[in-house]
Image (cartoon, rainbow, N blue to C red):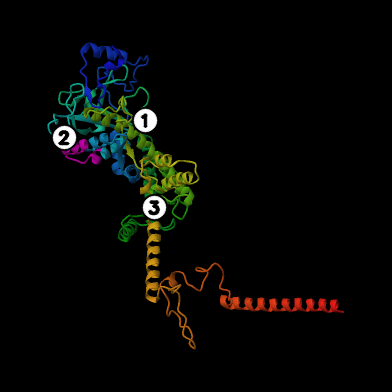
Amino acid sequence: MAFKDYLPFQSQSGNLDFIAKTISTDDMTALSKSMKVATLALGFRGVDYYFNNRAHFESSPYDFDRIIQAIDTDSYVRQAISKYKDLFWKEGWEIASENAEAVSYLLQRIDFLEMAMKRPFIEFLMEVFDQLIKFGNAFIVKARADVGEYFPTKLESVNGTLPIVGYYLIPTEQVRILRDKHNKPKSYMQQTDPFTYTPNGTDPTWSAEKVIHLHFDRKTGRAFGTPFLSTVLDDVIALRQMEEDIQNLVHRELFPLYKYKVGTPEQPAEPDEIDRAAAEIENLRAEGGLILPHRHDVEVIGGQGESLDATNYLQHFKERVAVGLGVAPHHLGMTMNGGNRAMSERLDTALYDKVKNYQRLFSEMIRLNIFNELLFEGGFDPIVNPSDSSTSDRCFFKFKEIDVDTQVKKETHIIQKYVNNIMTLEETRIALNVDPEVEVSDLYASMQGKVQIEIAKQQSEIAMKSQQAQKSAQGPTKDNADTQEPAPKGQRNLPNQRRGVGNSVRPANQNGRRTSPDIKRYDNQFLIMIESLLDEEYNTITVDKDTKEKEAVIDESGK
């Protein structure tokens, strides 16, 4: 038996429809052995409870409740998380694939998921990313039901299970994982009672194949991903403590403490005098003061502009919080250490790169854990291309560019390569992430050329018709019928009078109708007449000369 026969999905010969193949118990055992990953390392167990072994569920080593408290109470942490989520979904997303039918099927399947889940699919995805960015983990449970009779096309069961009709999330802070010694999850549990470390019969439990565990930055051998907020919580607490100290300092200096000394060593204060002074101070202010006999003298330190300047300390802890949150201070509304536009743009680009990294990981998670299984149920094969076609059924969860300025610069650079004959039109369109197949006649240059040709034709026809009309009106022998008619003898030419239509387009008194500038010349007939007279004069002179020469010869002969 070939290895491909063990695969649960295979295509029929000569047919693009994929069918599910039932695997027997023996074949499944052989498949498990053949695909088992050999390992010598064991999973990491970081909790030191006495009952902590492979037979018990493992809790997260990170305090998720503390992260929730920080997000709910600290404005900087809250704004940083909001900045990540806003940039993450800023320009939207789309499903991309070489097979348009696979994309259409997924969109239709998502519509059915929304009806079953009673919420938009994008809202579900936003909640998934919210869990990931806060805790570095997200746990999605698959809900299955028989919806084949309601779906327009046939849905194939995957390994004998019902089709997926929806997804729902488990609160990350309550999830416990049971793993084997090689880190493979066996089941997941939602621990509803935080005061016990052992499961009870009321806690929901799911097998591993029913749960999708998405995670960021999961260390080798660990069960949970690492939330980046865990590294900044101590800095946030230190900043808040510093701000509280400054608040106390301001409160103390804003309301000065009075030192009221009654009596002198020579004349000690009487008891009734101190009582009257105390009553007077109480009437002056609510914070009270000091009433001292001559034997006591208390000096208040820092009350005359000598208090500690905590500005640099406060700025230091603010920067630590901003760095720990992965954002620049100006992203949180802080204006520290000045800065210019170039610096702000570089910091914005660094934040965009970090968000794009999260987008790449999230896209691959959605493709692998959600799209692939939905495509298998619809009869598509996202793993291997069909044998008789070069079109792939694999669908990608694709985000649009969030840095629009950078996108414009990149696209302009690609277009310049095409203009300078470095790339072909097809390569250019592929680099621009658009369909490479296009009708050249539908492009702007072709359509603009067609419009110009039509305009030229229409202008030529109009000019020809106008010229013909002028010739018909003025007689068949009239040349240049659309030129300006000269004024009668004894009158001057008036502007814009007796002018034809063609004269407005190509005036007769400019080089547009003549091959040379308007140089004054005599009439051709007059020139011909002058030439004739000159010829006659020349001939007369020649004849007279010949006659005289002959007569001279005769005279000499006669002599």
Q: Is residue 201 left or right of residue 183?
A: left
What span is colored magenta in the figure?
Answer: 108-124
SS for dot 3: helix
Q: Are marks 2 and 3 in contact (CB under 8 Å)?
A: no
Q: Which mark is residue 217?
A: 1
Q: Residues within 10 Å of mark 2 (few under 14, many from 20)?
A: few
Vertical arrangement, residue 93 with respect to residue 26, above or below: below
The tag earlier along the polypeptide, 1 or 3, is 1
Q: Are marks 1 and 2 in contact (CB under 8 Å)?
A: no
Which residue has dot 3 on it?
Answer: 250
Q: Nearer the viewer, residue 419 or 522?
A: 522
The tag earlier along the polypeptide, 1 or 2, is 2
Predominant secondary structure, magenta span: helix
Q: Residue at x 30, y 43 (%)?
A: 73
Which quadrant of the structure image shows residue 95?
top left
Q: Is residue 547 left or right of residue 292?
A: right
